[in-house]
Image (cartoon, rainbow, N blue to C red):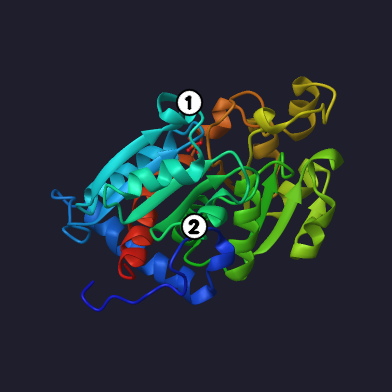
Amino acid sequence: MADQQKLSSRHLLGIKDLNRNDIELIFETAANFKAVLNRPIKKVPSLRDVTIANIFFENSTRTRLSFELAQKRLSADTINFAAASSSVSKGETLIDTVNNILAMKVDMVVMRHPYAGAGIFLSRHIKAQIVNAGDGAHEHPTQALLDAFSIREKYGEVIGKKVVIVGDILHSRVALSNILCLKQLGAEVMVCGPTTLIPKFISSLGVKVEHNLIKALNWCDVANMLRIQLERQDIKYFPSLREYTMLYGLNKQILDSLDKEITVMHPGPINRGVEITSDVADSKQSIILDQVENGVAVRMAVLYLLAGQI
Ligand code: CP
């Protein structure tokens, strides 16, 4: 990785920041890092002397651990900040909090925040590079990149693949970032769910809309099953979780009844027995844990490529 190429953006605030060449460059770099991660010595010195702050204002398991591991594998210095145990609870603002962290000579900030646009706001007020690790119901760019990378790994390419995203599209940052990323790469994308959970603007992004799960599954090569984002729902969007599961839950009987063998994905966290049953999540058609594995390599690639612009 001697001749480092650059991304077209200083920050990764959303897939909107990336063009197709950027995404291909991230994938090429991630594939190289994935090979490194499978070697006995998994660490490279690429980000030695780079300091990264992981600032999480919202809970996370996969994204936080994956970024932290990616940083360690790249030999970066890292500091971790969890809002719940910080002075945010004493009334400190986002900008003051981050500026205090940056005063400690931090080069890059990885931030998760419950408000859409928090990373964009911050990028206008601080000098450090920012990676969006999920901002409200807006974007989750590294999740979309690792999802598309996993599809590419499974099928050799993303172009022409039919991907259905099932569930709570309205409240999902994963859905929006996936749509933008998959469309950039030439996939066909469909969303499927109850009318109340599909935003009206979605067709303007060039995706198909289907409310019948069986029809959607028979159309697709890949089904990405989303969790119902109850924490972002202020009103009731469907009568009960039981009814949602009956209409939109993926179980083994449905999977086995399809005309072809589809691939099942899920960004996590899974609510087993709601949007997906255990026998599907753990089946050979599921690549859920491959997604998690690829997350580290993809995040290494993003951090490495962005750090080339410090
Ligand atoms: N997929 C995802 O963002 O999971 P976490 O909320 O656990 O980070």
Q: Which labelled disc corresponds to residue 55?
A: none
Is 271 in front, or is 303?
303
- In screen coordinates, is 205 left or right of 72? right
Which residue is drawn at the image coordinates 54% and 67% (left, top)?
17
Three-letter code for the amino acid on which mark 1 is drawn: Lys
Q: Which labelled disc corresponds to residue 125?
A: 2
Q: Are marks 1 and 2 in contact (CB under 8 Å)?
A: no
* Residue under numbered circle 1: 90
Is 42 in front, or is 163?
42
Q: Is residue 81 visible?
A: yes
Q: Is residue 219 visible?
A: no
Q: Position of residue 223 (x, y in %)?
A: 63, 47
Q: Secondary structure at mark 1?
A: helix
- In screen coordinates, is 47 left or right of 136? left
- In screen coordinates, is 79 left or right of 169? left
Which residue is drawn at the image coordinates 81% and 53% (left, top)?
209
Q: CA distance from mark 1 to mark 2?
A: 22 Å
Q: Position of residue 296 (x, y in %)?
A: 35, 49
